[in-house]
Image: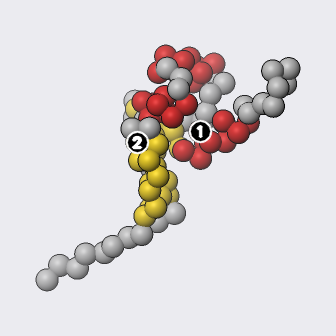
């Protein structure tokens, strides 16, 4: 008989992606997921990666992925209370 291990996971729907934390690790987001979440185009995200002005990202081979915590930290760092900030 095969035992199935049920791991606890918390999930949160973000745009077209599901943010999942399992065993203390969060899932990685594709650029399309971050684009849907932030409202920025894929081209803008690519440009921000090139200039180093966007959220931190990870290369997995040739694929780009983002940690949701890095996306949230980047958004928090760019939050302003007035246009002159």
Q: Secondary structure at mark 2?
A: strand
Q: Secondary structure at mark 1?
A: helix
**Seen from this angle, which residue lies furthest left?**
1
Task: Residue 20 in the image: state x and y as whole percent.
Answer: 44, 54
As drawn, 35 above or below 23: above
Task: Please name the residue that numbered disc 2 is placed on.
Answer: 17
**Seen from this angle, which residue lies furthest front?**
82
Return the residue nearer the eye: 85 or 64.
85
Task: Please name the residue that numbered disc 1 is placed on.
Answer: 71
Task: Residue 13 in the image: state x and y as whole percent.
Answer: 44, 47
As drawn, 84 above or below 31: above
Return the residue nearer the eye: 47 or 8.
8
- At x 62%, y 42%, the residue is 72
**Colour treatment of the image:** secondary structure
Return the residue nearer the eye: 63 or 16.
16
Nearest to N terminus: mark 1 or mark 2: 2
As drawn, 47 above or below 26: above
Of circles 1 and 2, the one toward us is 2
Q: Give the position of the C terminus as an image quadrant.
A: top right
- At x 74%, y 33%, the residue is 79
Q: Is residue 10 left or right of residue 7?
A: right
Q: Give the position of the N terminus as an image quadrant.
A: bottom left
Q: Is residue 65 left or right of residue 70?
A: left
**What is the distance, in whole Å, between disc 1 and disc 2 at their CAs?**
14 Å
Res 61 seen here: yes
Task: Residue 57 in the image: state x and y as whole percent.
Answer: 55, 35
Q: Is residue 20 left or right of residue 4?
A: right
- At x 47%, y 58%, the residue is 21
As drawn, 14 above or below 55: below
């Amino acid at each position: 008989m095969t035992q199935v291990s049920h791991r606890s996971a918390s999930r949160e729907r973000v745009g077209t992606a599901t943010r999942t934390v399992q065993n203390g690790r969060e899932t990685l987001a594709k650029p399309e997921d971050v684009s849907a979440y932030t409202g920025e185009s894929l081209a803008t995200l690519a440009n921000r990666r090139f200039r180093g002005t966007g959220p931190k990202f990870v290369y997995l081979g040739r694929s780009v992925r983002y940690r949701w915590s890095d996306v949230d930290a980047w958004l928090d760092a760019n939050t302003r209370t007035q246009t002159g900030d």
